[in-house]
Each structure stands twice: as structure tokens, then as C-alpha cells.
Image: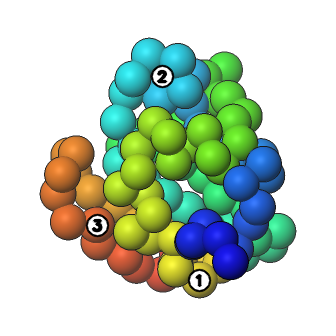
Amino acid sequence: MSDWPFDQPENCSAITSKDIAFDGAPILQVFHDEDDHGWQFLGLGEPVPENTAIICMAGIVKLDPSVKEVAHIEPGWFAWQEQVADKWKIEILEG
């Protein structure tokens, strides 16, 4: 049995930013979408559509293995940290 912690397979697409995918920017927010159970791995602040990138879930974990710590969050919830190595905080998304 695999130790893959997410509810989506390793080859499933996830949303991130080009800064994270290609430039080493940190993942500081993780969203588990309520509507399609998809995942978003972003920095702090508002995402910019022109900066969006699609990457497989395994690629995200390779960039930042700490995201496995929040793989259990339910759809409609998100996790965030102010800087790398902070403890992840988990909250429900408000309407």
C-alpha cells in the first residue's frame, strides 16, 4: 500500500504559481477545493492569473515535502504558514 497522503493521485493536476513551480518560491497556502476536491498550492497574497501554472501533485510534494502535513484537510478548508518551516495553520474557507 502506498504512503501517498492526498485524496488525489500523484499524477493529478494541481494549481500553483510559476514562481513556485519554476523559481523556487515557497508554498505558503494550500487550498483543498470544495467543488471538485482539487488542490491549490500558492504563496501569500492574491494569485495573479498570468502567473498560474499546472503541476502534478507529486511535483508539488517534490518541491515542498512539508505539504504532506496538511494532506488530511477536508475539501473547503485551507492551510497556511507565514514563512517556510512555520507550523501549518488550518482554517475553513469562509463563503
User: Toward which corner of the image does residue 59 lie, by quadrant?
Assistant: top right
The residue indicated by pointer 1 is 74
* Type of amino acid under label 2: Asp
Which quadrant is the C terminus positioned in? bottom right
Q: Is residue 24 left or right of residue 53?
A: left
Residue found 57% across the figure and 71% down from its top: 3
Does 9 appear above or below 91? above
93 relative position to 12: left or right: left
Q: Could you tell me which secondary element the residue under label 1 belongs to?
A: loop
Residue denoted by label 3: 88
Residue at 35% in and 36% down: 26
- The amino acid sitting under disc 1 is Glu
Q: Earlier in the sequence, mark 3 or mark 2?
A: 2
Residue 91 visible somewhere in the drawing: yes
Q: Is residue 49 visible?
A: no
Q: Nearer the viewer, residue 7 or 2?
A: 2
Q: Are marks 2 and 1 in contact (CB under 8 Å)?
A: no
The 10 Å Cα crowd at callout 1, few under 14, some 14 to 19, many 20 or more, is some
Q: Residue 21 in the image: x percent, y percent?
A: 55, 27
Q: Which mark is residue 94?
A: none
Sequence-first disc among 2 and 1: 2
Residue 27 sits in quarter: top left
Indicate how the structure is coloured in the image. rainbow
Quadrant into which the N terminus falls:
bottom right
Residues at marks 1 and 3, CA–CA distance in whole angstroms: 15 Å
In this figure, which residue is indicated by the disc labeled 2?
A: 19
> Left or right: 5 with respect to 14?
left
Residue in view at x 43 percent, y 58 percent: 67
Residue at 76% in and 61% down: 9
Amino acid residing under circle 3: Trp
